[in-house]
Amino acid sequence: MMNRDAHFICEATGGELVSGPNSVFGDVSIDTRTITPGAAFFCLKGPNFDGHQFAQDALGKGASLLIVERTSLPSLARLPDGLHGIVAVDDTERALAQAAAAWRRAHDVKVVGLTGSSGKTTTKEMVDAVLGSHGPTLATRGNLNNHLGVPLTLFRLSPEHQFAVIEMGMNAPGEIAYLAELSQPSVGVVTTVGQAHTEGVGSLDGVADAKGELLRALPSDGLGIIPSGIDRRSRLTSQVSAKLETVGEAQDDVVRLARYDAMGERASGEVLIDQQLYPVSIELSGRYNLDNAMLALAVGRALGVSMEDAISALGKVAPPALRGEIRTLADKTEVVLDCYNANPQSMRAAVGTFVQRHPNGVLALGDMLELGVSAEEEHAHLGEFVANLDGQPELVGVGRLSQHTVNGALGAGMQRVRTAWYSDAVSAANHVGARCSAGRALLLKGSRGMRMERIFEVLSQERGQ
């Protein structure tokens, strides 16, 4: 196993040890607020920040190695001479990626790359649980799924890991291809292709092309796993040399849904895998979460996990924070917090599942961001979708774009008395609180920037939790 030291960084990046010893490092950090003793600190530079300004702080918190840009060396002249290793590179951000890729190549580990317009974080948690039932597994933490987060995740690899689950996000073409080049996955999972981040890729076709970068990056002996009913399937899978497997309700799906129980807080049913029926029950609600579970089962099947162990592990996966978690206020009002992300596809799935369980529930729906030129139209379509649901839900739009959601619902025949609109979550809290009660559940959903959970925070203060 290669040493994790300054010489390793130099070899991986073409850098030069310009001061101090060949320091060994443990963690890798780009933020002094989370630095640990013995860490390597990469001094990243951007349009509005310069990590070199925090080099002294990093050393004070115990960093053993600094990676700096050659052009910034003069500004570091006052650092303690020779006491810590300093590696100079041309570009610290590129060096972080280069070193992380080298560290990944040094490990004999099965890497699962995972992306999608919605459901990728929940599916990542499920795949982590399934593979973890079989052997030590590394998985992306939180939202570290971009050009900085993926390298930091790869640096957490250790010889004990048999598997790694790397979540990959994107805002523009080429980003997933770049992350796949660093991670070198042998299995790739695409959860959905939907209207998310179209501001960066232009259209649903652009989303399919961008998500397909993961599948096209797989080796010829690799495996891609997708839902059989995924949108833009032919475009998503074009020019893919790896084997493809699907999950869903089609006859040739490797994990096929045989029965789905629609009611209840837990999504449950039966799946058919290799001619054998298995009961499945998970702590998350909704058919879409059962779809995510089937993707995780397909990964486990491909990598040698027993289906009994995989299904048992899935049954213990709790909803990630703000991603469909169910909370209860002191007065027994049920609140579903799905406040981390939103696009038309995930919004319809969450709303449909909620209204099926709570026909007279309250829907507090915030703006869906990053939809580009189609934003107003998509919000109007969402309103039409709500108006045409069975039941008598109330709709509260939150945010500028959500005016179009309310107008779309009214235009589709929803009674005005069942609608309201507010500019932000805090402004909406009192109205929402007056409309929901122990007998009337509440769904909070919107893009992260809308911070819909603030409604829950207000209600928690008023009623307790």
Image: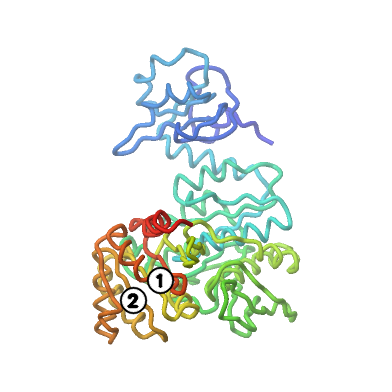
Residue behind mark 1: 347
Badge 2 local density, few (<14 within 10 Å), some, or many (20+)? Answer: many
Q: Position of residue 350 (x, y in %)?
A: 45, 72
Q: Position of residue 423 (x, y in %)?
A: 24, 62
- Relative to 4, residue 438 above or below: below
Q: Is residue 128 left or right of residue 321?
A: right
Q: Which residue occupies the foreground of this view, 236 or 273? A: 273
Q: Is residue 386 left or right of residue 227?
A: left
Q: Secondary structure at mark 2?
A: helix
Q: Disc 2 or 1, which lies upstream in sequence?
A: 1
- Relative to 238, residue 456 above or below: above
Q: Position of residue 349 (x, y in %)?
A: 45, 74
Q: Position of residue 172 (x, y in %)?
A: 36, 58
Q: Is residue 12 visible?
A: yes
Residue behind mark 2: 382
Of all residues, the one furthest to the top in this rendering is 81
Q: Quadrant of residue 275?
A: bottom right
Q: Residue at x 51, y 68 (%)?
A: 191
Q: Are marks 2 and 1 in contact (CB under 8 Å)?
A: yes
Q: Mark 2 to mark 1: distance in Å?
A: 8 Å
Q: Is residue 233 visible?
A: no
Q: Residue at x 48, y 67 (%)?
A: 334
- Amino acid carrying label 2: it is Leu
Badge 1 local density, few (<14 within 10 Å), some, or many (20+)? Answer: many
Q: Residue at x 45, y 62 (%)?
A: 337
